[in-house]
Amino acid sequence: MKSLVATRTQKTERVFLIGAEFQARSAWDVRDSLDELAQLAATAGGQIIGDGTQKMDKPVAATFIGTGKAAEFALRCQADDVDTVIFADELSPAQGRN
């Protein structure tokens, strides 16, 4: 019973998803990837607040997505009180920090 009570009092994590559309990946593939990621995050107890994509040739070394799009997503996440951002691709440690 104790674990059941703890679950009820925990704050639901608010999640924003990000996908990148590269030349080798169609918009449909990115959408499918984000939909699958949304289901995984929801299964883990997260509340999906929204998602965003960027069409690009290759990842940006520092931030994976472009700095303008990163700033746009950051403002949206702040406005929507997002706790966690999940990328549909693997990030380097530096990209994760940035």
Image (cartoon, grey):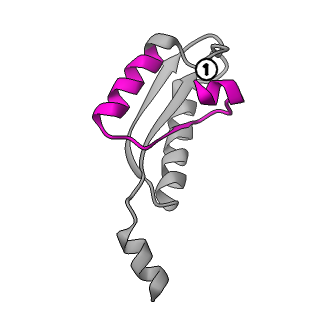
Query: Residue 32 at what x, y percent from top left?
Result: 53, 39
Work out whether 42 lies above or below 84: below
Q: Quadrant of the C terminus?
A: top right
Query: Residue 88 at what x, y percent from top left?
Result: 59, 36
Q: Which residue is mark 1?
A: 64
In the picture, residue 23 is in which quadrant? top right
Q: Confirm whether the magenta stretch covers residue 93.
A: yes
**Which residue is at a point 62% across and 30% down the rendered structure image?**
96
Residue type at mark 1? Phe
**Which residue is at a point 52% across and 60% down the rendered structure image?**
44
Work out whether 19 lies above or below 70: below
Q: Confirm whether the magenta stretch covers residue 58.
A: no
Work out whether 22 lies above or below 52: above
Nearer the observer, 24 or 66: 66
**Which residue is at a point 64% across and 16% down the rendered structure image?**
59
How many marks can you see?
Answer: 1
- Packing grade of label 1 (10 A; few <14, some 14-19, many >=20) is many
Query: Residue 79 at what x, y percent from top left?
Result: 28, 32
Segment colored magenta: 69-98
In the picture, residue 65 is in which quadrant? top right
Nearer the observer, 40 or 73: 73
Query: Which type of secondary structure does the marked residue at label 1 adopt?
Result: loop
Q: Is residue 42 left or right of residue 94?
A: left
Q: Residue furthest left?
A: 79
Q: Quadrant of the N terminus?
A: bottom left
Q: Is residue 56 left or right of residue 71?
A: right
Q: Is residue 98 left or right of residue 50?
A: right
